[in-house]
Image: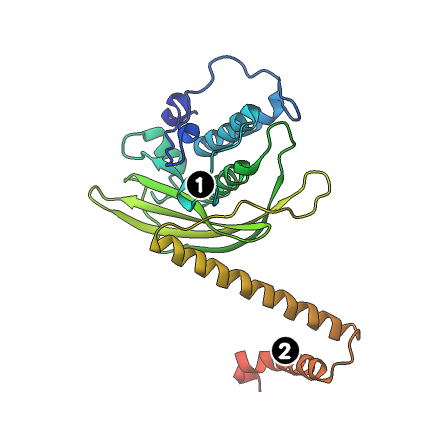
């Protein structure tokens, strides 16, 4: 069953421009279309038909942008977070079929569907952001999900009110970018946020598979600056954790003579052995 959102086209808006206004569903059969350096086949587009309506439209929009093969417009200093902003409305109150697609047996939103939408939305945001530095005619870079840093669920709303999913790039490093997404419940006069997610993507060269630079962002508002600073802290913390894990592997493999590292590794082993007694003191 194809919902009304699919028949009429999901309306997805953005401050960046017309790329996020979805056209009506293609009436003619999908044909094999070839561009200069990449090919979109019937299989690529038909695969999205097995997804939910929102994911289908996001996938088709990304394929459409690849076929056009034209970079986004950015200023000389770099793009702003708002330029990568994509909004997805869920008109549950007026679209019964769409509401039924996302409703679980208890009348709440199916979280599996929302996870699919988060994955597709983050992929589109990362693609459009990296596309701002894309040279027409060249192969598109490979965008890889490096980590899902956080998905915070404050509550699980019922499928009887409209929802609003929005996301944008919140932080950029040399070859990675962090994307923040939130979903809010539309109570008429205000939006009540109930979901927050952070995903990190890495951009790779399509031929060498090595990391390449991503376009930087320039925060404009105090809120964007706070998100950027927090993203920098999270990135530095993950780097420290990776170095810490690598040092433990070297000590465990006997590849280092550092006495301090060996003592620290022994302390971790003793704590691991004592953890059952700490968690279940009745076994002592």
Q: In percent of the image, x 74 and y 75: which residue is there?
A: 251
Please state which of the two labelled residues, at mark 2 or mark 1, is closer to the viewer.
1
Residue designated by label 1 = 84
Q: Quadrant of the N terminus?
A: top left
In the image, is 11 to the left or to the right of 60?
Answer: left
**Rendered view: 8 above or below 269:** above
**Rendered view: 148 above or below 139:** below
Question: Residue 134: where, in percent of width, then height?
Answer: 58, 35
**Dot 1 lies on which element?**
helix
Which quadrant of the structure image shows residue 265? Answer: bottom right
Is 97 or 77 nearer to us in this picture?
77
- Colour scheme of the picture: rainbow
Disc on res. 23: none
Is 178 or 2 nearer to us in this picture?
178
Mark 1 crowdedness (10 Å alpha carbons): few <14, some 14-19, many ≥20: many
Task: Give the residue furthest to the bottom.
Answer: 284
Q: In percent of the image, x 35 and y 34: which residue is there?
A: 99
Is 274 or 60 nearer to us in this picture?
60
Is 71 or 278 nearer to us in this picture?
71
Which quadrant of the structure image shows residue 276? Answer: bottom right
Question: Residue 63: where, in percent of width, then height?
Answer: 54, 28
**Dot 2 lies on which element?**
helix
Q: Earlier in the sequence, mark 2 or mark 1?
A: 1
Question: Residue 108: where, in percent of width, then height?
Answer: 35, 45
Which quadrant of the structure image shows residue 83? Answer: top left
Question: Residue 214: where, in percent of width, then height?
Answer: 57, 46
Residue designated by label 2 = 272
In the image, is 96 to the left or to the right of 151?
Answer: left
Mark 2 crowdedness (10 Å alpha carbons): few <14, some 14-19, many ≥20: few
Q: How many marks?
A: 2
**Rendered view: 185 above or below 132:** below
């Amino acid at each position: 069953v194809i919902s009304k959102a699919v028949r009429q086209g999901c309306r997805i808006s953005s401050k960046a421009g017309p790329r996020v206004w979805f056209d009506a569903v293609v009436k003619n059969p999908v044909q094999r279309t070839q561009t200069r350096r990449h090919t979109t086949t019937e299989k690529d587009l038909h695969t999205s038909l097995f997804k939910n309506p929102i994911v289908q439209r996001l996938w088709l929009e990304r394929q459409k942008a690849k076929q056009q093969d034209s970079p986004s417009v950015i200023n000389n200093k770099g793009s702003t977070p708002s330029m990568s902003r994509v909004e997805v409305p869920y008109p549950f109150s007026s679209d019964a079929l769409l509401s039924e697609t996302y409703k679980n047996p208890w009348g709440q939103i199916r979280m599996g569907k929302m996870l699919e939408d988060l994955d597709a939305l983050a992929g589109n945001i990362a693609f459009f952001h990296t596309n701002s530095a894309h040279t027409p005619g060249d192969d598109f870079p490979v965008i890889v999900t490096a980590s899902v840093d956080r998905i915070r669920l404050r509550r699980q709303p019922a499928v009887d009110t409209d929802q609003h999913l929005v996301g944008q790039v919140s932080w950029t490093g040399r070859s990675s970018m962090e994307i923040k997404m939130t979903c809010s419940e539309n109570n008429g006069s205000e939006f009540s946020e109930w979901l927050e997610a952070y995903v990190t993507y890495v951009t790779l060269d399509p031929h060498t598979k090595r990391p390449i630079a991503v376009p930087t962002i320039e925060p404009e508002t105090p809120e964007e600056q706070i998100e950027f600073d927090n993203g920098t802290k999270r990135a530095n913390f993950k780097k420290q954790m990776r170095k810490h894990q690598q040092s433990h592997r070297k000590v465990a493999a006997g590849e280092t003579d550092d006495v301090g590292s060996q003592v620290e590794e022994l302390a971790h082993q003793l704590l691991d052995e004592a953890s059952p007694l700490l968690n279940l003191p009745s076994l002592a």
